[in-house]
Amino acid sequence: VRARKRVSQLLSQYVPEELAHEYRKDPQFLELRGEERTISVLFCDVVGFSAISEQLEPQQLAQWLNLFFTHVSRIVVRYRGSIDKYMGDSVMAVWGAPARSESHAYDALCAAMDIQSEIESLNRKCLEHNLPTITMGIGISTGQAMVGPLGSEYRMDYTVVGDTVNVAQRLEEQTRKYQVAIIVSDKTAEALPDMLFRELDTVTVKGRKQQVTMFEPLGAETQVNDIVMNWLKLHRKAMKASKEGQWDVACELFSQLREDWGPVGMYDLYLRGIEQARKL
């Protein structure tokens, strides 16, 4: 009994309390051993952290980061995710480990969308403490990863490693370039047929040979209004024309979407890309 209680206390540091409670009822619910598993990983990072951190005293910086970590972690736990680690100004969260999950991609995306939609309440707290407001970027990747306890005789951590983790981190970095709040991998989008996504680009991310097609989540198909649906149709038509080398059609549609939908910076990227392609 004492050993089980100790394990349960340790688990609560890795997973939400409700999942630790499941383990207390059924020890087979969680498996603390290394294995390959399909999971979803979320990386959340503060945009412009270096410049902002230089303006703050160490105590203010700690307070500011704690507000950010609390905001993200509360929502991750709400959707039955596990905080894997905090790294500087980043949060890495996992669904599908240690507790298995059939809805890991959906839960990760719901958490990401709530993190962004509830950012106003976070920034009100920042302003109350005379701290800068926070803007975040989020990347989500779904796929195989090695999960389990890793470390040494001096310290062990239950964590996940592999290509899926790398992709999530790289997608988060791309949010600055494409000026969108959330970017998910093609495998995440494929796992969620009832959600609508805007295709952004196909890129080779650092540390990976195979390309990744990136998507911006727009929400559940049943909740997206007719105006956004029309813009999405135009966007898909423009992307298709661009891939097929129909530069005039793509250019006209991207220019229209730049004015009507945005973000402006993202559509400027596409238009510059067409300009360069025409010179080849």
Image (cartoon, rainbow, N blue to C red):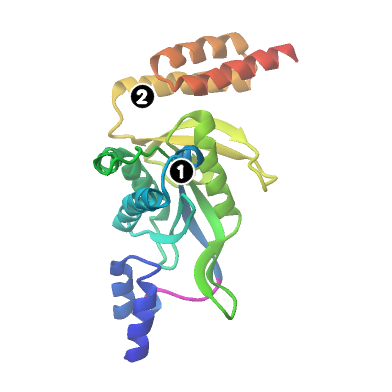
Residue contact at pointers 1 and 2, CB within 8 angstroms: no
Residue positioned 69% across, 12% down in the render: 278
Amino acid at circle 1? Ser
Residue positioned 40% across, 49% down in the render: 61
Residue 153 image position (x, y, % from top left): 58, 81
Quarter of the view holding residue 152: bottom right
In this rendering, is residue 256 above or below 76?
A: above
Overall secondary structure of the magenta section: loop
22 relative position to 213: left or right:
left
Residue 18 image position (x, y, % from top left): 28, 68
What residue would you read off at disc 2? 229
Residue mark closest to the camera, 1 vs 2:
1
Q: Residues within 10 Å of mark 2 (few under 14, many from 20)?
A: some
Amino acid at circle 2? Met
Nearest the viewer among 105 and 48 is: 48
Q: Residue furthest front?
A: 57
Q: For the magenta stretch, what is the residue range?
A: 29-34
Quarter of the view holding residue 70: bottom left
The numbered disc on residue 53 is 1
Residue 74 image position (x, y, % from top left): 30, 55
Is residue 31 covered in magenta?
Answer: yes
State the SS at label 1: helix
Is residue 68 covered in magenta?
Answer: no
- Rounded to the nearest angstrom, the CA distance separating label 1 from label 2 is 40 Å
Residue 42 image position (x, y, % from top left): 46, 50
Residue positioned 62% across, 36% down in the render: 203
